[in-house]
Image (tube, rainbow, N blue to C red):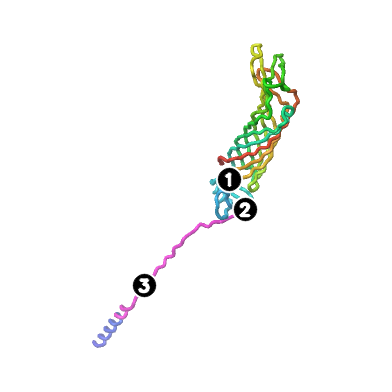
Amino acid sequence: MPFKKLVFIIFLLSLELVNAQRKKTDTVYVYEKVIVYDTVYLEKALKIKTNDLHFKPRVFNEAAIRELSFFDFHIIDTTKGLLIPTRKFELGVEAGIGLKNSNWAKESSDNRQQTGFNAGIWISRNVFKRFSLMLSAHVYYWNSTFDLDANKEETWLDGYYFTEDHQPLLFQKFNDKHLEYAMQLKLFYEWKKFRPFIGFLANQNIYKMQFMVPENNVLNKLDDFKSQQINFGYSFGVQYRIMQKLLLSLEYQEYTMKNISLKNSSFNFDIFKTNNTFAERKINLGISYRISSW
């Protein structure tokens, strides 16, 4: 009996030693790193490119276009050839040269074409897709094509004239050199790099005629008589975009000068008859620069 117990104990110890020698299986925990990205949905996608920046066309939706509005450039929809301005208002300056044809002095000069130059400022606003409105103000200086001087030679205006209260005036000088002030409203249509336009204008030509006028009942003072009326007309032309901020323009203008008169605040006198009408036509070549936009 003791022998059997001893064998049983030895068997248990052997079994325990075998179990102790077995390799235990390790537990491995696998962690997965999950990265969450935002989902972007594109609606009404437009294939666009920019005028100022050069890179491959990308696809943007309408919301993306609004986000890009702080950049200073235009967006072009290449599928429709449509220029989409990101700015509503633009401010710029313009300068140019021109030719004016007038029948004002048809009896005094064989050369009716006056040369001149101009400078101005403009503001423009996009109104609908390719259409924009521009309001401009210009000052023109026109050179003389003839010169009437009674002190140098006989002219067809020589002689004495009398005011309504019978004061004598003696003609001295007159030429068609003058300043012109003009305001214009134009409607533009954007087509690629070309911008054809039509416009309505109002202007004032400051012509001057010089007389010897009485002072203290003695005819010894020189004074000017000036034209002051406002004239109305129309214009049309085209602009070509050389660069994003630089444009070249060619413009034709025509207007009539009705009931033109030369006035002086001190004398009630008009050398011209009433119901007279003069026509003037101009061709201007100019260059325009956009200063800013917002």
Residue 287 sits in quarter? top right
- Real-space Cα separation, disc 1 to disc 3, in angstroms: 71 Å
What amino acid is labelled 3 in the image? Asp
Q: Tag 1: Cα neighbours inside 10 Å, few (<14), some, or many (≥20)? A: some
Q: Nearer the viewer, residue 167 or 39?
A: 167
Residue 21 within the segment the image draws in magenta: yes
Is the C-beta separation of discs 2 and 3 under 8 Å?
no
Q: Tag 2: Cα neighbours inside 10 Å, few (<14), some, or many (≥20)? A: few
Magenta-colored segment: predominant secondary structure: loop
Q: Nearer the viewer, residue 147 or 95?
A: 147
Q: Position of residue 200 (x, y in %)?
A: 68, 36
Residue 130 in the figure: left or right of residue 277: left
Q: Position of residue 176 (x, y in %)?
A: 68, 28
Badge 1 element: loop
What amino acid is labelled 2 in the image? Thr
Circle 3 residue = 26
State which region is magenta: 17-46
- Real-space Cα separation, disc 1 to disc 2, in angstroms: 17 Å
Q: Tag 3: Cα neighbours inside 10 Å, few (<14), some, or many (≥20)? A: few
Circle 2 residue = 78
